[in-house]
Image (cartoon, grey):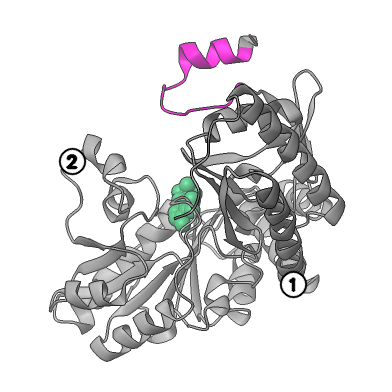
Amino acid sequence: MSRWIDLEKKYYMPVTRRQPIVLVKGRGARVWDEEGKEYLDFVAGWAVNSLGHCHPVVVEAVEKQVSTLVLASNQFYTLPQLELAQFLAENSCLDRVFFQNSGAEANEGAVKLARKYGKVHLGGAYKIITALNSFHGRTLTMVSATGQPHYQEPFTPLTPGFVHVPFNDVEAIKEATDGETCAIMLEPVQGEGGVIIPASDYLQKVRQWCDEKGLLLILDEVQTGMGRLGTLFGYQHFNVEPDVMTLGKGLGGGIAIGAFLAKERCVALQPSDHGTTFGGNPVACAAALAVSRYIVGKDIPSHVARLGEYLKGRLELLRARYEIIREVRGLGLLLAVEFWENISGELVSACNSEGLLVNPVRPNAIRLMPPLTLTPEEVDEAVRRLDRALGKVLKEEGQKAVPQPG
Ligand SMILES: *Cc1c(COP(=O)(O)O)cnc(C)c1O
Protein backbone atom coordinates (compact mmCIF):
# COMPACT_ATOMS: atom_id res chain seq x y z
CA MET A 1 0.00 0.00 0.00
CA SER A 2 1.19 3.51 -0.80
CA ARG A 3 3.00 5.37 1.96
CA TRP A 4 0.68 8.31 1.31
CA ILE A 5 -2.26 6.16 2.37
CA ASP A 6 -0.36 5.24 5.55
CA LEU A 7 0.25 8.93 6.25
CA GLU A 8 -3.42 9.70 5.81
CA LYS A 9 -4.36 6.89 8.18
CA LYS A 10 -1.99 8.24 10.79
CA TYR A 11 -2.42 12.02 10.56
CA TYR A 12 -5.66 12.94 8.83
CA MET A 13 -9.01 13.22 10.61
CA PRO A 14 -10.70 9.91 9.93
CA VAL A 15 -13.81 11.38 8.31
CA THR A 16 -13.30 10.97 4.57
CA ARG A 17 -14.07 7.69 2.81
CA ARG A 18 -11.52 7.56 0.03
CA GLN A 19 -10.83 5.23 -2.82
CA PRO A 20 -7.33 3.73 -2.53
CA ILE A 21 -5.93 5.91 -5.32
CA VAL A 22 -3.28 8.60 -4.90
CA LEU A 23 -3.74 11.15 -7.70
CA VAL A 24 -0.78 13.26 -8.74
CA LYS A 25 -1.67 14.82 -12.10
CA GLY A 26 -4.61 15.82 -14.25
CA ARG A 27 -5.16 17.01 -17.82
CA GLY A 28 -8.56 17.50 -19.42
CA ALA A 29 -10.90 14.68 -18.45
CA ARG A 30 -8.04 12.45 -17.32
CA VAL A 31 -6.04 12.02 -14.12
CA TRP A 32 -3.01 9.89 -13.27
CA ASP A 33 -2.06 8.14 -10.05
CA GLU A 34 1.39 7.90 -8.49
CA GLU A 35 2.16 4.77 -10.50
CA GLY A 36 1.30 6.46 -13.77
CA LYS A 37 -2.03 4.68 -14.25
CA GLU A 38 -4.49 6.82 -16.22
CA TYR A 39 -8.17 7.29 -15.38
CA LEU A 40 -11.12 9.00 -17.05
CA ASP A 41 -12.38 11.32 -14.34
CA PHE A 42 -16.18 11.23 -14.09
CA VAL A 43 -16.02 12.55 -10.53
CA ALA A 44 -14.23 15.77 -11.55
CA GLY A 45 -13.72 16.93 -7.98
CA TRP A 46 -17.47 16.41 -7.35
CA ALA A 47 -18.56 18.50 -10.32
CA VAL A 48 -15.87 21.11 -9.69
CA ASN A 49 -13.44 20.72 -12.60
CA SER A 50 -15.91 22.16 -15.08
CA LEU A 51 -13.33 22.69 -17.83
CA GLY A 52 -11.39 19.55 -16.91
CA HIS A 53 -8.02 19.49 -15.19
CA CYS A 54 -5.48 22.23 -15.79
CA HIS A 55 -7.44 23.91 -18.60
CA PRO A 56 -5.14 26.54 -20.17
CA VAL A 57 -7.76 29.25 -19.59
CA VAL A 58 -7.72 28.56 -15.84
CA VAL A 59 -3.96 28.07 -15.63
CA GLU A 60 -3.25 31.33 -17.44
CA ALA A 61 -5.74 33.34 -15.40
CA VAL A 62 -4.36 32.03 -12.10
CA GLU A 63 -0.69 32.41 -13.12
CA LYS A 64 -1.25 35.96 -14.26
CA GLN A 65 -3.21 37.00 -11.17
CA VAL A 66 -0.98 35.19 -8.67
CA SER A 67 1.98 37.20 -9.90
CA THR A 68 0.03 40.49 -9.89
CA LEU A 69 -2.10 40.68 -6.72
CA VAL A 70 -3.11 37.68 -4.60
CA LEU A 71 -5.20 39.23 -1.83
CA ALA A 72 -5.80 42.69 -0.45
CA SER A 73 -8.93 42.27 1.76
CA ASN A 74 -12.40 43.59 1.12
CA GLN A 75 -11.40 46.84 2.76
CA PHE A 76 -10.38 47.84 -0.79
CA TYR A 77 -11.65 47.43 -4.33
CA THR A 78 -9.95 44.73 -6.40
CA LEU A 79 -10.48 44.11 -10.10
CA PRO A 80 -11.37 40.50 -10.88
CA GLN A 81 -14.03 40.51 -8.13
CA LEU A 82 -15.95 43.37 -9.71
CA GLU A 83 -15.56 42.09 -13.27
CA LEU A 84 -16.87 38.70 -12.15
CA ALA A 85 -19.78 40.26 -10.26
CA GLN A 86 -20.73 42.20 -13.38
CA PHE A 87 -20.40 39.13 -15.59
CA LEU A 88 -22.58 36.93 -13.37
CA ALA A 89 -25.23 39.63 -12.91
CA GLU A 90 -25.35 40.37 -16.65
CA ASN A 91 -25.68 36.68 -17.49
CA SER A 92 -28.29 35.74 -14.88
CA CYS A 93 -31.65 37.04 -13.62
CA LEU A 94 -29.99 38.26 -10.40
CA ASP A 95 -28.68 41.76 -9.77
CA ARG A 96 -26.12 41.66 -6.97
CA VAL A 97 -23.38 39.24 -5.99
CA PHE A 98 -21.29 38.45 -2.93
CA PHE A 99 -18.34 36.05 -3.11
CA GLN A 100 -17.44 33.40 -0.57
CA ASN A 101 -15.01 30.48 -0.57
CA SER A 102 -17.30 27.47 -0.80
CA GLY A 103 -20.82 26.30 -1.48
CA ALA A 104 -21.68 25.98 2.20
CA GLU A 105 -20.53 29.54 2.82
CA ALA A 106 -22.54 30.78 -0.13
CA ASN A 107 -25.63 29.12 1.34
CA GLU A 108 -24.85 30.64 4.75
CA GLY A 109 -24.83 34.04 3.08
CA ALA A 110 -28.15 33.33 1.35
CA VAL A 111 -29.71 32.23 4.64
CA LYS A 112 -28.43 35.33 6.44
CA LEU A 113 -29.91 37.46 3.66
CA ALA A 114 -33.25 35.65 3.97
CA ARG A 115 -33.31 36.04 7.75
CA LYS A 116 -32.60 39.76 7.46
CA TYR A 117 -35.26 40.04 4.76
CA GLY A 118 -37.70 38.34 7.14
CA LYS A 119 -36.85 40.81 9.88
CA VAL A 120 -37.18 43.85 7.65
CA HIS A 121 -40.06 42.90 5.36
CA LEU A 122 -41.94 39.93 6.88
CA GLY A 123 -42.47 40.94 10.49
CA GLY A 124 -39.59 38.86 11.85
CA ALA A 125 -40.32 35.67 9.91
CA TYR A 126 -37.21 33.44 10.04
CA LYS A 127 -38.12 29.88 9.08
CA ILE A 128 -36.78 28.37 5.89
CA ILE A 129 -38.37 25.36 4.26
CA THR A 130 -35.91 22.92 2.66
CA ALA A 131 -36.31 19.46 1.16
CA LEU A 132 -35.70 16.04 2.61
CA ASN A 133 -32.80 14.28 0.90
CA SER A 134 -31.26 17.68 0.09
CA PHE A 135 -27.63 18.68 0.51
CA HIS A 136 -26.57 22.22 1.36
CA GLY A 137 -23.12 21.80 2.91
CA ARG A 138 -21.27 20.94 6.10
CA THR A 139 -21.26 24.01 8.32
CA LEU A 140 -23.51 23.57 11.34
CA THR A 141 -26.25 25.75 9.88
CA MET A 142 -26.06 24.03 6.49
CA VAL A 143 -26.17 20.65 8.21
CA SER A 144 -29.34 21.97 9.84
CA ALA A 145 -30.69 23.01 6.44
CA THR A 146 -29.78 19.67 4.85
CA GLY A 147 -32.71 17.25 5.03
CA GLN A 148 -30.71 14.13 5.87
CA PRO A 149 -30.75 13.07 9.55
CA HIS A 150 -27.47 11.14 9.35
CA TYR A 151 -25.57 14.40 8.74
CA GLN A 152 -27.34 16.00 11.72
CA GLU A 153 -27.49 13.48 14.54
CA PRO A 154 -23.83 13.71 15.66
CA PHE A 155 -24.02 17.49 15.97
CA THR A 156 -27.26 18.41 17.72
CA PRO A 157 -28.47 20.86 18.87
CA LEU A 158 -28.87 22.26 15.36
CA THR A 159 -29.52 25.79 14.18
CA PRO A 160 -33.26 26.30 14.66
CA GLY A 161 -35.59 27.51 11.94
CA PHE A 162 -35.34 24.85 9.23
CA VAL A 163 -38.40 22.86 8.24
CA HIS A 164 -37.95 19.82 5.99
CA VAL A 165 -40.55 18.57 3.54
CA PRO A 166 -40.49 15.88 0.83
CA PHE A 167 -38.87 17.05 -2.42
CA ASN A 168 -41.07 17.45 -5.50
CA ASP A 169 -44.20 17.96 -3.35
CA VAL A 170 -45.71 21.46 -3.60
CA GLU A 171 -48.56 20.64 -1.23
CA ALA A 172 -46.07 19.72 1.49
CA ILE A 173 -44.48 23.16 1.11
CA LYS A 174 -47.88 24.83 1.36
CA GLU A 175 -48.72 22.88 4.51
CA ALA A 176 -45.36 23.66 6.10
CA THR A 177 -45.66 27.40 5.43
CA ASP A 178 -46.75 29.53 8.36
CA GLY A 179 -46.55 33.16 9.46
CA GLU A 180 -42.90 32.69 10.46
CA THR A 181 -41.73 31.37 7.08
CA CYS A 182 -39.39 33.71 5.18
CA ALA A 183 -37.97 31.52 2.42
CA ILE A 184 -37.92 28.22 0.57
CA MET A 185 -34.51 26.81 -0.33
CA LEU A 186 -34.19 24.03 -2.91
CA GLU A 187 -31.73 22.43 -5.30
CA PRO A 188 -33.19 22.45 -8.84
CA VAL A 189 -31.96 18.84 -9.09
CA GLN A 190 -30.88 17.04 -5.92
CA GLY A 191 -27.27 16.11 -6.63
CA GLU A 192 -25.78 14.50 -3.57
CA GLY A 193 -29.23 13.02 -2.85
CA GLY A 194 -28.84 10.76 -5.90
CA VAL A 195 -29.56 12.99 -8.92
CA ILE A 196 -33.28 13.42 -8.25
CA ILE A 197 -35.10 15.44 -10.92
CA PRO A 198 -38.40 17.02 -9.89
CA ALA A 199 -41.52 17.23 -12.06
CA SER A 200 -41.00 19.82 -14.80
CA ASP A 201 -43.55 22.21 -13.22
CA TYR A 202 -42.51 21.74 -9.56
CA LEU A 203 -40.28 24.79 -9.29
CA GLN A 204 -42.81 26.94 -11.17
CA LYS A 205 -45.47 25.97 -8.65
CA VAL A 206 -43.11 26.72 -5.77
CA ARG A 207 -42.37 30.07 -7.42
CA GLN A 208 -46.11 30.84 -7.57
CA TRP A 209 -46.49 29.93 -3.89
CA CYS A 210 -43.58 32.20 -2.96
CA ASP A 211 -45.15 35.06 -4.93
CA GLU A 212 -48.51 34.49 -3.27
CA LYS A 213 -47.03 34.49 0.24
CA GLY A 214 -44.22 36.98 -0.29
CA LEU A 215 -41.51 34.39 0.44
CA LEU A 216 -38.03 34.29 -1.03
CA LEU A 217 -37.18 31.43 -3.38
CA ILE A 218 -33.54 30.46 -2.84
CA LEU A 219 -32.10 28.03 -5.38
CA ASP A 220 -28.96 26.21 -4.31
CA GLU A 221 -27.19 25.92 -7.65
CA VAL A 222 -23.84 25.01 -6.13
CA GLN A 223 -23.90 21.75 -8.11
CA THR A 224 -26.34 22.53 -10.93
CA GLY A 225 -25.02 25.97 -11.88
CA MET A 226 -22.46 27.04 -14.49
CA GLY A 227 -23.63 24.77 -17.30
CA ARG A 228 -23.86 21.42 -15.53
CA LEU A 229 -27.49 20.72 -16.53
CA GLY A 230 -27.12 21.91 -20.13
CA THR A 231 -28.25 25.45 -19.34
CA LEU A 232 -26.01 28.09 -17.77
CA PHE A 233 -28.11 27.89 -14.61
CA GLY A 234 -30.50 25.13 -13.58
CA TYR A 235 -33.37 27.57 -13.09
CA GLN A 236 -33.37 28.23 -16.84
CA HIS A 237 -34.11 24.59 -17.55
CA PHE A 238 -37.15 24.75 -15.26
CA ASN A 239 -38.32 28.17 -16.49
CA VAL A 240 -38.35 29.93 -13.13
CA GLU A 241 -36.44 32.82 -11.65
CA PRO A 242 -35.14 32.54 -8.10
CA ASP A 243 -34.89 35.56 -5.80
CA VAL A 244 -31.60 34.29 -4.48
CA MET A 245 -29.16 31.82 -6.04
CA THR A 246 -25.99 30.24 -4.71
CA LEU A 247 -23.03 29.01 -6.73
CA GLY A 248 -19.85 27.10 -5.91
CA LYS A 249 -18.31 23.91 -7.24
CA GLY A 250 -17.86 24.45 -11.02
CA LEU A 251 -17.65 28.24 -10.82
CA GLY A 252 -13.89 28.40 -10.31
CA GLY A 253 -12.94 25.47 -12.53
CA GLY A 254 -11.10 23.90 -9.58
CA ILE A 255 -10.23 27.01 -7.60
CA ALA A 256 -12.24 27.44 -4.38
CA ILE A 257 -15.01 30.02 -4.72
CA GLY A 258 -18.66 30.37 -3.79
CA ALA A 259 -21.18 33.10 -4.45
CA PHE A 260 -24.66 34.16 -3.48
CA LEU A 261 -26.65 36.36 -5.81
CA ALA A 262 -29.94 38.15 -5.26
CA LYS A 263 -32.48 40.33 -6.97
CA GLU A 264 -32.18 43.98 -6.07
CA ARG A 265 -35.44 44.13 -4.10
CA CYS A 266 -34.34 41.19 -1.91
CA VAL A 267 -30.98 42.60 -0.82
CA ALA A 268 -31.83 43.34 2.78
CA LEU A 269 -28.18 43.25 3.88
CA GLN A 270 -26.50 46.51 4.85
CA PRO A 271 -22.90 47.57 5.45
CA SER A 272 -21.24 45.36 8.11
CA ASP A 273 -24.06 42.76 8.15
CA HIS A 274 -21.76 40.30 6.43
CA GLY A 275 -18.12 39.89 5.48
CA THR A 276 -15.28 37.57 4.58
CA THR A 277 -11.49 37.56 4.61
CA PHE A 278 -10.78 35.36 1.63
CA GLY A 279 -14.08 35.57 -0.25
CA GLY A 280 -13.83 37.45 -3.52
CA ASN A 281 -10.03 37.38 -3.57
CA PRO A 282 -8.38 38.28 -6.87
CA VAL A 283 -6.97 34.82 -7.66
CA ALA A 284 -10.24 32.91 -7.15
CA CYS A 285 -12.19 35.59 -9.00
CA ALA A 286 -9.73 35.70 -11.90
CA ALA A 287 -10.09 31.92 -12.28
CA ALA A 288 -13.90 32.10 -12.06
CA LEU A 289 -14.04 35.00 -14.51
CA ALA A 290 -11.97 33.06 -17.04
CA VAL A 291 -14.13 29.94 -16.52
CA SER A 292 -17.41 31.87 -16.76
CA ARG A 293 -16.34 33.72 -19.91
CA TYR A 294 -15.27 30.44 -21.49
CA ILE A 295 -18.52 28.68 -20.58
CA VAL A 296 -20.66 31.50 -21.97
CA GLY A 297 -18.38 32.41 -24.91
CA LYS A 298 -18.06 28.84 -26.20
CA ASP A 299 -21.71 28.02 -25.41
CA ILE A 300 -20.60 25.10 -23.27
CA PRO A 301 -24.18 24.57 -21.96
CA SER A 302 -25.34 23.52 -25.46
CA HIS A 303 -22.39 21.15 -25.70
CA VAL A 304 -23.32 19.74 -22.28
CA ALA A 305 -26.95 19.23 -23.33
CA ARG A 306 -25.90 17.36 -26.50
CA LEU A 307 -23.21 15.31 -24.83
CA GLY A 308 -25.42 14.51 -21.85
CA GLU A 309 -28.05 13.07 -24.21
CA TYR A 310 -25.34 11.10 -26.00
CA LEU A 311 -23.96 9.70 -22.73
CA LYS A 312 -27.47 8.88 -21.52
CA GLY A 313 -28.15 7.03 -24.77
CA ARG A 314 -24.98 4.99 -24.38
CA LEU A 315 -25.92 4.16 -20.79
CA GLU A 316 -29.41 3.15 -21.92
CA LEU A 317 -27.75 0.68 -24.31
CA LEU A 318 -25.94 -0.79 -21.30
CA ARG A 319 -29.26 -0.98 -19.47
CA ALA A 320 -30.69 -3.02 -22.33
CA ARG A 321 -27.84 -5.51 -21.85
CA TYR A 322 -27.59 -5.58 -18.05
CA GLU A 323 -30.79 -6.42 -16.21
CA ILE A 324 -29.24 -5.20 -12.97
CA ILE A 325 -29.46 -1.60 -14.21
CA ARG A 326 -32.76 -0.24 -12.97
CA GLU A 327 -32.65 3.32 -14.28
CA VAL A 328 -30.49 5.89 -16.03
CA ARG A 329 -31.43 9.43 -15.09
CA GLY A 330 -30.12 12.96 -15.08
CA LEU A 331 -29.84 16.22 -16.93
CA GLY A 332 -26.89 17.47 -18.93
CA LEU A 333 -23.73 16.02 -17.44
CA LEU A 334 -25.17 15.24 -14.02
CA LEU A 335 -26.29 11.64 -14.37
CA ALA A 336 -26.93 8.62 -12.18
CA VAL A 337 -27.16 4.92 -12.95
CA GLU A 338 -29.31 3.08 -10.43
CA PHE A 339 -29.20 -0.69 -9.87
CA TRP A 340 -31.62 -3.25 -8.45
CA GLU A 341 -28.97 -4.24 -5.91
CA ASN A 342 -26.47 -2.45 -3.70
CA ILE A 343 -23.47 -2.94 -5.96
CA SER A 344 -22.05 0.56 -6.14
CA GLY A 345 -19.17 -0.17 -3.73
CA GLU A 346 -17.96 -3.16 -5.75
CA LEU A 347 -18.69 -1.43 -9.02
CA VAL A 348 -16.64 1.64 -8.11
CA SER A 349 -13.68 -0.62 -7.23
CA ALA A 350 -14.05 -2.43 -10.55
CA CYS A 351 -14.28 0.91 -12.37
CA ASN A 352 -11.10 2.04 -10.61
CA SER A 353 -9.28 -1.01 -12.01
CA GLU A 354 -10.67 -0.33 -15.48
CA GLY A 355 -9.54 3.30 -15.32
CA LEU A 356 -12.84 5.10 -14.76
CA LEU A 357 -13.55 7.25 -11.69
CA VAL A 358 -17.22 7.47 -10.64
CA ASN A 359 -19.02 8.45 -7.43
CA PRO A 360 -20.97 5.89 -5.36
CA VAL A 361 -23.75 8.36 -4.59
CA ARG A 362 -26.06 5.68 -3.13
CA PRO A 363 -25.46 2.02 -2.18
CA ASN A 364 -27.44 1.18 -5.34
CA ALA A 365 -26.47 4.09 -7.59
CA ILE A 366 -23.41 5.75 -9.10
CA ARG A 367 -23.23 9.41 -10.10
CA LEU A 368 -21.44 10.66 -13.23
CA MET A 369 -20.37 14.32 -13.32
CA PRO A 370 -17.49 14.58 -15.80
CA PRO A 371 -15.89 17.83 -16.97
CA LEU A 372 -18.26 19.86 -19.15
CA THR A 373 -15.63 19.88 -21.91
CA LEU A 374 -15.87 16.09 -22.35
CA THR A 375 -15.71 14.74 -25.92
CA PRO A 376 -17.87 12.02 -27.55
CA GLU A 377 -14.74 9.84 -27.82
CA GLU A 378 -14.23 10.12 -24.07
CA VAL A 379 -17.88 9.16 -23.54
CA ASP A 380 -17.38 6.04 -25.68
CA GLU A 381 -14.23 5.12 -23.81
CA ALA A 382 -15.82 5.66 -20.40
CA VAL A 383 -18.85 3.55 -21.31
CA ARG A 384 -16.55 0.74 -22.56
CA ARG A 385 -14.72 0.85 -19.22
CA LEU A 386 -17.99 0.87 -17.28
CA ASP A 387 -19.20 -2.05 -19.40
CA ARG A 388 -16.09 -4.07 -18.51
CA ALA A 389 -16.39 -3.15 -14.82
CA LEU A 390 -20.05 -4.18 -14.73
CA GLY A 391 -19.20 -7.46 -16.45
CA LYS A 392 -16.56 -8.13 -13.80
CA VAL A 393 -18.85 -7.36 -10.86
CA LEU A 394 -21.67 -9.52 -12.20
CA LYS A 395 -19.28 -12.39 -12.90
CA GLU A 396 -18.05 -12.18 -9.31
CA GLU A 397 -21.63 -12.07 -8.08
CA GLY A 398 -22.27 -15.28 -10.06
CA GLN A 399 -25.02 -13.58 -12.06
CA LYS A 400 -27.38 -13.43 -9.10
CA ALA A 401 -31.04 -13.41 -10.03
CA VAL A 402 -32.27 -9.89 -10.66
CA PRO A 403 -35.77 -8.82 -9.68
CA GLN A 404 -37.85 -7.56 -12.56
CA PRO A 405 -39.73 -4.28 -12.49
CA GLY A 406 -43.21 -4.89 -11.12
C1 LIG B 1 -21.43 20.48 -2.70
C2 LIG B 1 -22.67 21.20 -2.40
C3 LIG B 1 -22.71 22.17 -1.36
C4 LIG B 1 -21.54 22.42 -0.45
O1 LIG B 1 -20.46 22.97 -1.12
P1 LIG B 1 -19.03 23.03 -0.37
O2 LIG B 1 -18.18 23.78 -1.34
O3 LIG B 1 -18.60 21.61 -0.16
O4 LIG B 1 -19.23 23.75 0.90
C5 LIG B 1 -23.89 22.85 -1.18
N1 LIG B 1 -24.97 22.63 -1.95
C6 LIG B 1 -24.96 21.73 -2.94
C7 LIG B 1 -26.18 21.55 -3.78
C8 LIG B 1 -23.82 20.97 -3.20
O5 LIG B 1 -23.82 20.05 -4.16
Asked whether the viewer can see residue 69, the reply is no
Q: Which stretch appears magenta?
A: 4-20
Give coordinates of residue 301: x percent, y percent. 71, 69
Q: Does the beta carbon of the residue at mark 1 sit less than 8 Å from ligand 1?
A: no
Asked whether the viewer can see residue 244, the reply is yes
Q: Is residue 7 above or below residue 103?
A: above
Q: Residue at x 42, y 78 (%)?
A: 203
User: With 241 as the anchor, is 146 left or right in this view?
Assistant: left
**Residue at which label 2 appears:** 156
Give the CA separation, mark 1 to mark 2: 44 Å
Q: Amino acid at mark 1?
A: Ser
**Quadrant where the C terminus is found in the figure:** bottom left
Mark 2 is surrounded, within 10 Å at the Cα level, by few (under 14), some (14 to 19) or many (20 or more) other residues, namely few
**Residue at which label 1 appears:** 302
Nearer-the-camera pick, 106 or 5: 5
| Numbered disc 1: secondary structure | helix
